[in-house]
Image (cartoon, helix red, strand yellow):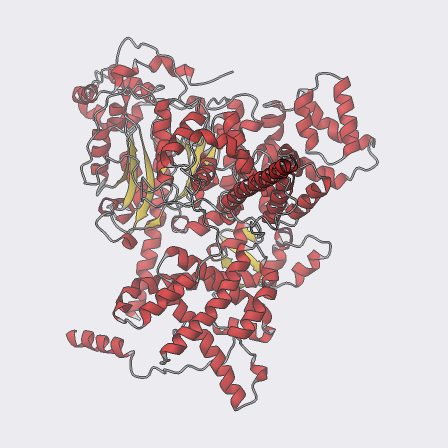
Amino acid sequence: MFRAQKKRVLERTTFGHEVEREQAYPDRLNMYLVPPLAEITLDQFEEWAVDRLRVLGEIETCVFRNIKAKQMEQSVRPLMEKYLPLSPNSTSGGGNKDMQLEEERKKDHYSHFILRLAFCRSEDLRRRFVKAETLLFRIRYLSVDPSERQALLRKYDFGWTPVSDEERDDLLPNLIFASENSSAPFEKTVKSESYFKVPFERVPELIETRRVYMKAGVAYVPSSLQLSLILSEFSAKLERALEITARALPRLDEDDRLVPILNHLSKGFVAPEYVPEGGDHGDGVKAWQVDSLVEHMPLCMRTMHQALRRDQHLRYYGRQQYGLFLKGIGLSVEEALTFWRKSFAKTTDDKFTKEYRYNIRHNYGLEGNRKNYRPMGCQQILSDAAPGPNDHHGCPYRYFSEDNLVASLEGIGIQDRSVLKQVKDDVKAKQYHVACTRVFEASHRTLHGVKSLIGTGVGMESITHPNLYFDRSLQMAKEAEKIEQASDEHAAAAATIAA
Amino acid sequence: MPSFKTDDLSQCRDPTEASSPQSQSSVVQQFDGNIQTSSSPTPVAVKEDDMFGDEDDDDFEAAADALESKSSSAPSSSAPMVAPISTPPSKTAGLDASDMPIFYQRLMPFKEIFQWLNHFPSPTTSFTNREFAFTLQNDAYLRYQSFPTSDAFKKEVNRLLPSRFEIGPVYSANPRDRKIVRKTAFRPLEKELVFDIDMTDYDDVRTCCKGTDICSKCWNFITVAIRVIDQALREDFGFQHVLWVYSGRRGAHAWVCDKRARTLDDSKRRAVASYFEVLKGGAQSSKRVNLKRPLHPFVARSLNILRDSFKDTILIGQDPWRTQESAEKLLSLLPDRELNDALRKKWASSGDRSSLQKWADIDALAEQGVSRTLDPTHLLEAKQDVILEYLYPRLDAEVSKHLNHLLKSPFCVHPGTGRVCVPINGERPETFDPMDVPTAGMLTAEINEWDMVHKTLDSPEREKLSDYEKTSLKPYVEYFHRFVSGLMKEEMKQKRQREAESSGSLDF
């Protein structure tokens, strides 16, 4: 027994004897299940990783700009061709071409695994890496030939059971009603479609949106939705692998050549997210000043503020969203406690201390796991818990009915028909941040008499964070004041000269 | 306005004398067969502590990162101390705190709860690494409690006499060791998939009661919700072990106990919760139902269930559109302007028409052809949307989405009402009436009465009977017992299968 153990140890350390260090890459699409084993130079290590990072970074930027997966390809393709090209087998003609093909795929393979090392270390990095890699895989999968897709399906066994024609015909009405396409000839499509049976756990995103028929825990997935299956398989496998890598990573620490590179890489993958500085407004904001600052707040925060003033209460998610926003504009924890205590006028001190105080302090990192929470960005507000019947949180552009939205906008002084129409169009196109930016521009044109934002030194990028809206609005107000002062002085100077 | 909270005021005594540690222990000491209850109960006015009908009522918000104990003094050692009780507990207004020792000692089915969470006769990690959270009578909140056996659990509950306790996930390590083990080694592994339906979420379509009040009219909302969710859990998701529990006041919880449900991770829980989400949007979105047509089979089937009780529950029970003003809400949900104008005119002229009549008027006028622009399909779909908007289950989805969300245990006593959180038969939810649910005080009295009547019985005769069998809690405990047996049988079967498979592969 001892001998057997020893042998196993030996095998582990040498990876056995017959391991082939150089792998062949017959296909373009790679699920990255097998790590690379050959040696590469340190320069390659860094260069390949950085090149892949450029592509992933662009993908993340698209996500933040709320660009749909379908349009993403356009923005990413140039970078992909430059930094991470993958040519199809058809371009091979022997000799040099073949070498190039192998080289491209090798780079793709190695760079993926290098970045795994860099991005496995925190949950946040893992999540973002999986998301970007999955989107990259999606773009590639859609751009390859059908024969290459088939090859991928053959190569990796996904464990899907095909549905027999009889079973499909038995379930036909249900399959039709569950299908996405509700136009007239859809019956025909369903009849000719091939279906797979998959345990529902494997296709959560299809369940979530009710895009498939469900029976006894089995989802009936049409082959047209296969992509979603493959992607969830891809991201699930990658997620698991990253966790394993994260656990193994401490053992890598002895290698002082790689660690600095890896650290550097993970820092390079910084989300283009707005980070409010907080407390940047002089001595911070006092609780009593909040009401006077409402005019600088975006519609979502105004809505919650008004609801809070009207009901003298705000439900959990509203408190979270608004509370963190206030933290972002510079309310200290003491001022926050004062603000909420006063706002919850109907609540007894006892109840307030018991039920609300903890959560406020928690947001400031003073309770629980002591994490210092950041104000939520638009992305988070849009993707987090949707508001229920008595809630006031969430993005108003997304959740308000058209009439209520128009009424609210008119309430904050947007009267211009053409602007309102444009906002409605933005909302219909689900471009909520564009709508918000438009409202910002419109309201600040009228509010401060500033003709255009250009020249005020305030950036023109779109609103991606409620605090960005606020900070920019406040900054503009100051600029406008300065201009006014300057022109007053100018006028005064002119007056004195004239006199 | 019928409210059942006032009914059990007779059970209330002055809360100031109710729960000092001394009085608790004295009750425990007195307990040896004869229970002393106060012979002259002094009713106290129940002050509604829940002024806002908030979401914070039934379960503590344990969002993913608010994992730490609320009470900074909560000790992490195996022997938490009871903090000295200085203020009279406000939450126990509907409940006499001195009933709690008797309830925990003699009525709470600890063995069944243990088996329910453990799935096997002897303790496994499903129980020993399971988190319990106690809310003490001074409102201190103790998280990360865990117990090696059912007896240890019972003993601790009897020592601390929590006003309620909640059940959390099974962790990869013992929750009491969470500060010792590495952070990554302590993560939630499994928990029953849970659902929470609360009457507060129906406030905008409820006319009979407000806030924390309920009556049998509005309980129909919950009944219908149970029917819709239960059926989908069984037919669509193939779950078999679905336990419905009355939340003690104005809602119901579902615990899906199948192994497959217990092991779902957060993203899958979110998927299931969203599958059930039909109403979308907050207070400001006028139309909350936006569905593709034809309806998904699940929505179509749910709609059929809702349609059956729409007339009784909404049109007659709630009568939401009786006034001219409230009828505008209905009109805003209908698609055709000309038809709306005709309806408005008719309702204005004919005075007081009930919602039932108004609902019928829609089709009647449509058939008369008052509108040339009317599209009958649109009208039909709009009417379907109205039914969904008013009656489709409103789930607190966040409770279902997180593996580490805590939920109040079955058979706890609701601190506000004193009622026991008893199981509801999911196959026949219409037989359940929250007004029939016994309170802890009633049950104590029932035990005493039984003991008085059967004083003459020999002691072996008397000991044959469990205490719960002497009370109106009996059918609920028996139902729970059957549920747990079914679940355990299934688990044993699966375990044998797994063992057979693994031993088979060894032989091979």
User: Position of B401 compared to A189: left or right?
Assistant: left
**In the displayed structure, would residue B250 be above or below residue B170?**
above
Placement of A20 over or under B34, stated as above or below: below
Kindly identify the residue that appears in the image at 41 percent across and 48 percent down.
B261
Relative to B54, is B150 on the left or the right?
A: left
Residue found at x 49% / y 54%: A204
**Vertical relation: A139 (above or below) B50:** below
Q: Quadrant of the C terminus of chain B?
A: bottom left
Is residue B463 something one can see in this rendering? Answer: yes
Residue A128, image x, y percentages: 45, 58
Q: Is residue B257 left or right of residue A131?
A: left
Task: Residue B382: name its quadrant.
Answer: top right
Q: Nearer the viewer, residue B172 or A476?
A: A476
Front in this rendered view, residue A137 or A180? A137
Q: Could you say which quadrant of the image residue B95 lies in?
A: top left
> Quadrant of the rendered structure where residue B137 is?
top left
- Whether residue A391 is visible, yes or no, is no
Extreme residue in the bottom direction = A95
